[in-house]
Image (cartoon, helix red, strand yellow):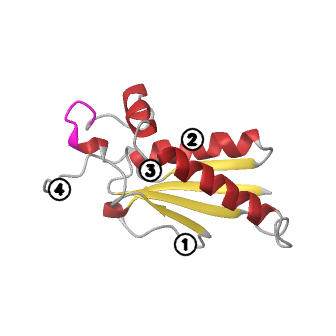
Amino acid sequence: MDIRITSFGHLHGPRPDDVHIVLDLRQHFRDPHWDTSLRPLTARDRKVIRAVKRTPGIEQLLAATVAQAQAYARGPGADQQPLHIAVGCAGGRHRAGVTAYLLARRLRRRGHEVDLHHRDMHRPVVDRAAP
């Protein structure tokens, strides 16, 4: 089954259309944005990847999402339409990008064709009030 994964930032607009699974990381997972050394970086930087991977719960979320995608792959419509997974955080530069990348890597290892798109990672850092 083909899978499309889109990372995005809720502060840059609504989630993508035609999504089957949405992972909203805003409230339940630590935001690297609040570490001033990580703020200007993106999900392509090792320090950000390491910070997100070490976030409690991310490993379990990835495993659960892979299992959910595998269930969709066994469904009768799996060959008719790609599964679309959207992964969102506040700005789309850190949590969503890393989580989407790690999810894509795991799904590719299981034989899926995965198209990964980072909608907002290139956008500037969003200024917002402290949590």
- Kindly state the secondary structure of the residue where label 1 is placed: loop
Q: Which residue is mark 1?
A: 17
Q: Which mark is residue 131?
A: 4
- Counting every numbered tag in the picture gives 4
The location of residue 31, given as percent across then percent down, is 30, 47
Earlier in the chain: of badge 4 and badge 3, it is 3
Which region shows up in magenta? 34-38
Mark 3 residue type: Ala
- Kindly state the secondary structure of the residue where label 3 is placed: helix
Mark 4 residue type: Pro
Left or right side of 118 for 45: left
- Kindly state the secondary structure of the residue where label 2 is placed: helix
Mark 1 residue type: Asp
- Which residue is situated farthest in the top direction here? 46
Q: Which residue is mark 2?
A: 102
Q: Which mark is residue 70?
A: none
**Disc 4/disc 3 C-alpha distance (Å):** 18 Å
